[in-house]
Image: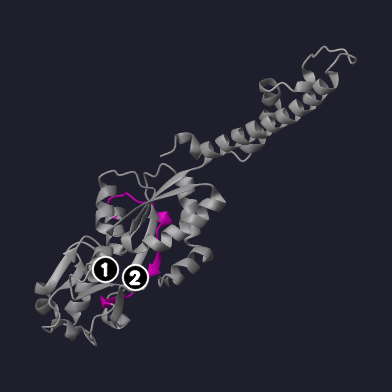
Amino acid sequence: MTSERTKDFKPGVFRKAYHLCGRLVPIILKPAADRKIKLETNQPGAADVRASGGILQKLNDMKKTLVCALLLFTVARIQAAEISVFAAASLTDSLKEIAAGYEKTSGDKITFNFAASSTLARQIEEGAPADIFFSADEAKMDGLEKKGLIDTATRKSRLGNALVVVVTADSPLQIRSAGDLTTAAVKQIALADPKAVPAGIYAQAWLTRQQLWPAIEPKIVPTENVRAALAAVESGNVEAGVVYKTDAGISKKVKVAYEVPAGDAPAISYPMAMVKESSQPDAAKKFLNYLDSKEAGDIFKKFGFILRD
């Protein structure tokens, strides 16, 4: 992480650095024009010396520019903040694209820790240095809020999603309803761990509502997170998997065999908030505001997320 001084950004710092260039550079690089070169004008080689003096002056001007640029760059690096974002694995591609654009305009550096929301929440509870938490469900955020670990004033439910059943792109399996997952043709089903990971919890709730969980539970292959469930299907190690619609959309190795109707599944909600112990509160709030902007929203929609008001 960057030092504490990055919190105290002063708008005039670059202007001061620019003026500093004007004072320091002449001292560091004394122009050739100021050098005392004693040479009679009629002495052989005088014209060459005068010409070389002009070249030296140009070289020194170039050096001045480079020194100033280096100084300004150093000041910019000192002032830039590094924001640590702990985010659900399903947000990986969309957040990376959003951060790339934000870094170019803000100068700040965004670093990510992508994992299951349950894993991230536990890491924050244990004191991991996070500035922002972007969860795939409200429950994990609720847990941190009850323990006083997030800034509640910054909390917002930003996104929604949908569940889908995926199979390999060349699979002949036909899944027309949840009941088809109980057939003998489906021997194993990859699912983010339903005991802890939001995607798995949502899927279990859906299958429980359909009164199918007891029949399907023995087929479940629990994975660390939703991206791992997707990978299990891509590899052909399981016949089917239940993942988010956004995850299915990024893979060319799987196809959606069945999309769970919104009315059959629990509401999927992605809240975001600043961690109370953030070392970069001002910068974190600015990035949260950007995540709530139209520019970021357009990228989230491109990846298949549903924007929540």
View extreme (right): residue: 42
Which residue is at 74% across, 26% downward? 56
Residue range corresponding to the magenta coloring: 146-168
N-term-proximal mark, 1 vs 2 = 1
Q: Quadrant of residue 26?
A: top right
Q: Residue at x 50, y 47 (%)?
A: 108
- Measuring from the top left, give residue 119's x and y in whole percent: 25, 54
Residue 294 drawn at (x, y percent):
53, 66
Residue 17 visible in the shown view: no
Q: Is residue 157 magenta?
A: yes
**The disc labelled 2 sits on which kind of residue?**
Ser
The answer for how far apart the CA atoms under marks 1 and 2 are is 8 Å
Verify whether residue 89 appears in magenta: no
Q: Residues within 10 Å of mark 2 (few under 14, many from 20)?
A: some
Quadrant for residue 66, please give it. Answer: top right
Quadrant occupied by the C terminus = bottom left
Across and down, in percent, residue 138 comes to: 31, 63
- Relative placement, left or right, of 89 versus 181 is right
Q: Which mark is residue 251?
A: 2
Residue 276 visible in the displayed image: yes
Q: Which residue is mark 1?
A: 230
Tag 1 near tag 2, CB within 8 Å: yes
What amino acid is found at the position of numbered circle 1 in the picture? Leu
Left or right: 185 as drawn, with respect to 98: left
